[in-house]
Image (cartoon, rainbow, N blue to C red):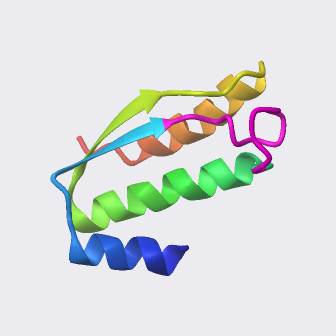
Amino acid sequence: MDNVVLIYSRDFTPEISILQMGVNGSKECAISNMRLNRNSYDFASNLLMDLQNKYGFKTLVLGGGGFVHPMLGQNWGIQIKNFIKNVKS
């Protein structure tokens, strides 16, 4: 997956990335059979931030799906933590 994302970003660098950060692909959520875990959301959000830092686009983050509590807040929290630590002042 890394190569697909990196090639896409190298060939097309957007001014802004809009991320709908749903977590309904998690293993706790019955709506999907993706079975993602916290490490999956941590990896994906860090990858996006690495791409943002490398290519200089801005990111608009929107909340999204996830229907099991407290998993919803925990997985959103992982992503938000990664976005905040990469904010440039």
Seen from the viewer's position, the closer of residues 75 and 67 is 67
Residue under the point 55% across and 56% down: 44
First to last magenta residue range: 21-34
Q: Is residue 45 left or right of residue 24?
A: left
The x and y percentages for residue 33 are 80, 47
Residue under the point 72% across and 54% down: 39
Residue 60 vertical position relative to residue 14 in the rendered view, above or below: above
Residue 36 vertical position relative to residue 13 in the rendered view, above or below: above
The x and y percentages for residue 79 are 55, 40
Q: Is residue 45 left or right of residue 26?
A: left
Tag count = 0
Residue under the point 42% across and 70% down: 5
Q: Quadrant of the C terminus?
A: top left
Residue under the point 30% across and 70% down: 9
Q: Is residue 33 magenta?
A: yes
Q: Is residue 25 magenta?
A: yes
Q: Quadrant of the N terminus?
A: bottom right
Residue 31 vertical position relative to residue 13 in the rendered view, above or below: above
Residue 20 picture quarter: top left
